[in-house]
Amino acid sequence: MTKSNFFTRSIHKKIFAIALPMMLSNISVPLLGLVDTAVIGHLPESYYLAGVAIGSMVVTLLFWILIFLRMSTTGLVAQAYGANNRQKSLHLLAQSMFIAVMLASAILLLQTPIARIAFHFVDGSEQVLFYAREYFVIRIWSAPAALMNMVLLGWLLGMQNAKAPMFLLIITNLVNIILSVLFVVVFHWGVAGVAWSSLISDYVALAVGISFVVKMVRPDWHKTQLQVLLKSVLNWVSLKYFIALNRDIFLRTLCLQIAFTFMTLQGVKLGDDVVSANAVLMQFLSLISFSMDGLAYAAEALVGKSIGSRRLDKLKEAIKVIIFWSLLFSVVQVLLFYCFGESIINQITSIVSVQEQAYRYLPWLILIPLTSMLGYVFDGVFIGMTRATNMRNSMIFSLCIVYFPTWFLAEEQGNHGLWLAMNAFMLARGMSLFWIYSRLDKNKQLIMQ
């Protein structure tokens, strides 16, 4: 990309046509986390907050190791969109929804052994485990809606439509926030109130998402026989490729969730106040990830479209501009956390012991926007290219060669060692993917299929 292309307005408009709506909507997600943590954090004991943190961690692990449902759908649909193949985009939607329903059914059928295994490895107090289980047994029933919502979000983004996901996420998170306050503050349902608000909002999201998709596909529906479409869902050739792609993204996401889960479990061993403080600080990490993911979503959609239309120049142009904006946003986040970090902590929880622990480890959060920036960008790039094997290998390297060895060397530092390992892990993700991208570019393999 030439210097003059970088300063043209068109590429920036294309990026922010997708990124800005997703940033606005995604900021509501950590806002929801802040509200949930705040309403529970103002209860008299820290074990309520710790219980929500553990229960939410287990449910999040289950759902987000299946995030390949969104990622693979976005990359494949964006490529179909770039190739102007509307029929294939509908086929991918039906195929992804079918797999989401099958996986959700399996989760519900196996929820009892899943809970038994998950909480067996949690070394928390009796009160923490009680409230963690209370959260889990309610929230797990949102699995069908949560997984199908991933597919709908991925399909809409692949179709270069960011406004519908924006309204979808904002509406459902507002519903969740209102219900959390109502159930916990007004009805005094405690931890169960937070779980019920999340469950209801997931199904509200499903209804809203289906309505958006139906509106988009209706003009083309007469071109597609329903029977033919449903039959194509079980076509083994396309299904085999779809499963292979999802397998590698699943392994990549599993490694990511292992890193976060390991940190939570190690925090539990350090005491209720430490794990509660980490839960508070994780809300900062959510704010970072969901704002940066707006640009990553733009990378997924635009890179996938460029692959489908076989425009290498557009691919490189989008990546360079997205890196520029990602770096700028990262610097802004560093300054925000440095200046207002303690004030944000005070708004989340009024428990003095938890506040003091969170202040101790806040400097590690101030660094994370910079150490994690490339990871978010190139996750989006590689999803758009549907190069899941490279993503898997990068994540395995970052987890096994960087994260765990760093923790092992810094274990005596306690929670400081955990946050050091997390920063090293985030940096390794981005640098390894950047190295792979550079190798592909050098060998002229960015658009080779």
Image (cartoon, helix red, strand yellow):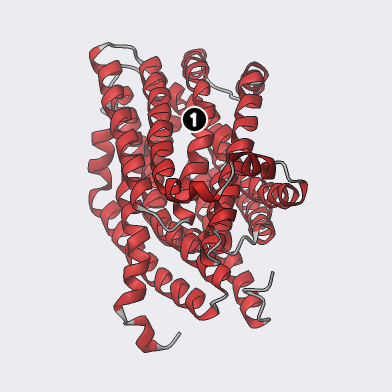
Q: In this view, does 320 lie above or below 148?
A: below
Q: Classify mark 1: residues with Cα within 10 Å, few (<14), some (14-19) or many (20+).
A: many
Q: Judge whether 74 appears above or below 138 on screen.
A: below
In this picture, residue 162 sits left or right of residue 116 = left
Quarter holding residue 398: bottom right
Q: Please name whichever residue, 5 or 400, is drawn nearer the observer in this view of the structure.
A: 5
Q: Residue sitting at 41 percent across and 38 percent down?
A: 209
Res. 112 visible in picture: yes
Q: Which of 132 and 303 is in front in this view?
A: 303
Q: Which element type, helix, strand or loop, lies under badge 1? A: helix
Q: Outermost residue, front direction?
A: 222
Quadrant holding the C terminus: bottom right
Quadrant in the picture for the N terminus: bottom left
Q: Going 48% across and 17% down the picture, which residue do you hit?
A: 138
Q: Where is residue 303 in the image (x, y as percent from the top left)?
A: 51, 67
Q: Which amino acid does label 1 sit on?
A: Ala
For residue 101, which quarter of the picture? top right
Position of 264 with respect to 209 (left or right) is right
Residue position marked by numbered label 1 in the rendering: 145
Q: Position of residue 438 (x, y in %)?
A: 60, 76
Q: Position of residue 251 (x, y in %)?
A: 67, 47
Q: Is residue 173 left or right of residue 301?
A: left
